[in-house]
Amino acid sequence: MKVTRKYQVTIPESVRNKLGVQIGDTLIVKSEDNQIIMESNKHISNPSDAIWNLFGKSLNIDATKLVEESWAKTGSLNQKKRAKNRRVS
């Protein structure tokens, strides 16, 4: 497995298929001794590992979903402001 200049790696197809990893899924990445371990959050072997991610390790966050939700909220707020401004004018 090769690490790109952006520190990305490609998960082999056989592993993706075995674990059911799909585009957009998030993985938990941790290190133990001299190993890098990636776990599918669908199959977390130790749930406390996921909790520890809240305290200094990388977080299991779907950034795309957060941005889309933010846009949806901002869009609905802007629509309400425009409607209110039309009533005031």
Image (tube, rainbow, N blue to C red):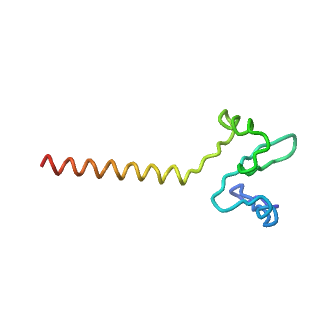
Q: Is residue 41 left or right of residue 75?
A: right
The percent coordinates of residue 67 (x first, y second) are 49, 51
The percent coordinates of residue 58 (x first, y second) are 67, 42
Where residue 4 sits, quadrant-wise, is: bottom right
Residue 83 position (above or below residue 52): below
Quadrant of the drawing holding the N terminus: bottom right
Pick out the residue farthest to the top.
55
The percent coordinates of residue 71 (x first, y second) are 42, 52
Pick out the residue farthest to the bottom.
13
| Residue displayed at 46% across by 50% down | 69
Q: Which of these two is toward me, 82 or 44?
A: 44
| Residue displayed at 65% across by 45% down | 60
The percent coordinates of residue 53 (x first, y second) are 68, 38
Pick out the residue farthest to the left.
89
| Residue displayed at 68% across by 56% down | 6
Residue 16 position (above or below residue 77): below
Q: Is residue 54 left or right of residue 81?
A: right
Q: Which of these two is toward me, 69 or 43?
A: 43
Q: How many marks?
A: 0
